[in-house]
Amino acid sequence: MHYFIELSDEAKLDIKEALEYYTAISISLKDRFEVALTKSIELLFKNPLHHQVRYRKIRIVFTEVFPYGIHYIVENEHIYVLKILHTKRFFK
């Protein structure tokens, strides 16, 4: 089955904030984060139903090295990325 990925505005903002954070530390660290995030999204794209439902029909795929989880739902042929959250921060 062919899927379409759609990033929410919140997910785009999460990516922007993470990139700014890692850029402030090191350009190479930012580049490594981008690669890790891209790999996780590609993995999600290839097999979105592989990851179990965690809460309210939301599934999570984690990046390999960085502590981020990509929260998404699958509806028919669409994958909706809702948030990209740092796993060690407190969110309301």
Image (spheres, rainbow, N blue to C red):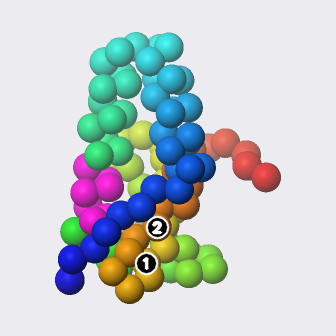
Q: Nearer the viewer, residue 9 or 64?
A: 9
Residues at badges 2 and 1 in contact (C-beta under 8 Å)? yes
Q: Residue at x 30, y 30 (%)?
A: 32
| Label 2 packing within 10 angstroms: few (<14), some (14-19), many (20+) | some
- The percent coordinates of residue 56 (x first, y second) are 63, 80
Q: Quick check: 83 left or right of 75? A: right
| Label 1 packing within 10 angstroms: few (<14), some (14-19), many (20+) | some
Label of residue 74 in the image? 1
Check disc 1 and give the amino acid type.
Val
Image: magenta residue range? 39-45
- The percent coordinates of residue 91 (x first, y second) are 73, 49
- The percent coordinates of residue 21 (x first, y second) are 53, 23
Disc 2 secondary structure class: strand
Check disc 2 and give the amino acid type.
Tyr
Q: Quick check: 46 left or right of 80? A: left
Label of residue 80 in the image? 2
